[in-house]
Image (cartoon, rainbow, N blue to C red):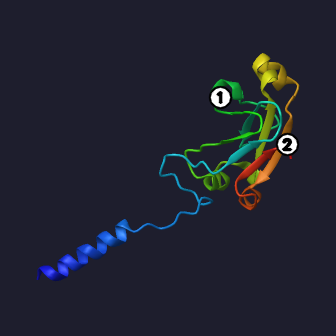
Amino acid sequence: MYRPILLLFSAFCLNFLSCKEKNPLECNIENGRDDRLTIHNNSASTIYYSLDYYNSSSLNHNPSNSGDGYAVYPNSTTKFKSKICIEHLFDGVIENDTLIIFFYDRHLVDSSWQYVRDNNLWLERRKITLPELEQQGWQVKYPL
């Protein structure tokens, strides 16, 4: 009587504890964030980046308000951390299936965000789709 229960329990435990190799390109928010999107700054200056989900032409988010959260230092990388899988942003939040990424000069933003915003003084405005992100392995490089 105990043997079948013990075998069933053992099989359940082994299945539960077995490790599958995780694909780093698949969404995994076990740590509370989807952090696949990586921004590479291949320039000699510190930049800020911001994401626009709504395809607006106005710059609403001041990246310096987030401390260094949106800063990328020269010749380095940072990861954008989303509370939900980025694919879900494309499913329901991002308009026209296109994410817009703005890159700014950090010193200019820190001196006057209002001036940068009023004059559209971004370094680059890049449109990217989900298939393009996946094809690039979730890597976005500045400059191109």
Q: Residue at x 58, y 63 (%)?
A: 23
Q: Residue at x 73, y 51 (%)?
A: 139
Q: Is residue 139 above or below residue 62?
A: below
Q: Is residue 95 above or below residue 111?
A: below
Residue 84 vs residue 96: left or right? left
What's the mark number on residue 143? 2
| Secondary structure under the numbered disc 2 in the rendered image | loop
| Secondary structure under the numbered disc 1 in the rendered image | loop
Is 5 or 87 nearer to us in this picture? Answer: 5
Q: Is residue 96 above or below residue 65?
A: below
Q: Residue furthest top?
A: 111
Q: Spatial distance from mark 2 to mark 1, Cα to Cα?
A: 20 Å
Q: Residue at x 67, y 53 (%)?
A: 90
Residue 94, x across and y down, in percent: 70, 48
Is 119 or 26 nearer to us in this picture? Answer: 26
Residue 51, x across and y down, in percent: 72, 40
Q: Amino acid at mark 2?
A: Pro
Residue 17 can be seen, yes or no: yes
Quarter assignment of residue 81: top right
Quarter assignment of residue 54: top right
The residue that disc 1 covers is 68
Q: Amino acid at mark 1?
A: Asp
Residue 55 can be seen, yes or no: no
